[in-house]
Amino acid sequence: MKYKSVKGLLKSDESLIPVTFIDKLEDILHGFLGIVLFLISVLAAGYSLLRLIETRPFFPLGMIQAINDILFVVIILEIMRTVIVRFTDGIFQLDNFLIIGVIAAVRHILTVGASLTMEKEKTTENFNRSLMEMGVNTGIVLALVFALFLSRAARARLRLRRPRALHRRRGECRTPVCRAAAHRRANRPCAAPASRTLRPAESCAKR
């Protein structure tokens, strides 16, 4: 076995740590994080159920608090799903982070709305601040939903382009766009005849 110096390894493209070892360590950490997030979600769901039973009055305080807790559990589950997808596919999906942002903003809007509903003495300053927070969070929700729409539209367009490119490389294009392009190429006239003795159509056929 030929040993290399550390200086030589730093100058070359090789890594001091094997890539397979880094991949295995990363997979172990992602699996551990997924298990931890699952346990946290179970504990949060149990605590939310216990608090829902003990909260008085149930309407409207208990219901609003239960919805808030459920959205918190959903956020934890979405984060766990993101970690699992990173563990299986090797990449982080943008849609999951956008969904988490939308749920978090909606949860904050519900919290602010519940505080406005339950407060008996409402000052003008607190009321205006709450309205401003709800407006900002509403704008965040709209922006994240639009970003989610753009992400899925781009993925769908890329998914449609891949089969066309594959069929074109293999010469098996069956889509109307490909058939129209092939028809235009077949009926395209020649720029110039190959020889003076042949007509343009004959020179095209010969070529």
Image (spheres, rainbow, N blue to C red):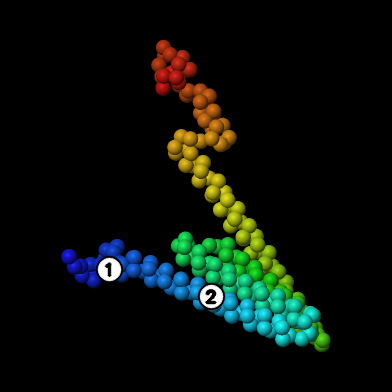
Confirm whether residue 116 shows in the render.
Answer: no
Q: 187 and 77: which one is in front?
A: 77
Residue 172 picture location, percent across and down: 48, 35
Q: Is residue 104 above or below residue 85?
A: below
Circle 2/circle 1 CB separation < 8 Å: no
Labelled disc at residue 185: none
Residue 123 picture location, percent across and down: 80, 86
Residue 104 picture location, percent across and down: 64, 72
**What kind of residue is marked 1?**
Leu
Alpha-carbon distance for marks 2 and 1? 38 Å
The quadrant in which the C terminus is found is top left
Mark 2 lies on a secondary structure that is helix
Q: Judge left or right: residue 190 versus residue 141.
A: left
Based on the displayed image, in which of its 4 quarters is residue 67 positioned? bottom right
Q: Is residue 100 above or below residue 45?
A: above
Residue 6 picture location, percent across and down: 23, 71
Confirm whether residue 97 shows in the render.
Answer: yes
Labelled disc at residue 10: 1
**What kind of residue is marked 2?**
Leu
Mark 2: few/some/many CA within 10 Å (<14, 14-19, 20+): some
Q: Residue at x 44, y 37 (%)?
A: 170
Q: Residue at x 56, y 32 (%)?
A: 180
The quadrant in which the N terminus is found is bottom left
Q: Residue furthest top?
A: 197
Q: 131 and 100: which one is in front?
A: 100
2 or 1: tag closer to the N-terminus? 1
Q: Is residue 16 above or below residue 186?
A: below
Labelled disc at residue 37: 2
Q: Judge left or right: residue 57 versus residue 16.
A: right
Q: Residue at x 53, y 45 (%)?
A: 161
Based on the displayed image, in which of its 4 quarters is residue 100 positioned? bottom right
Q: 48 and 162: which one is in front?
A: 48
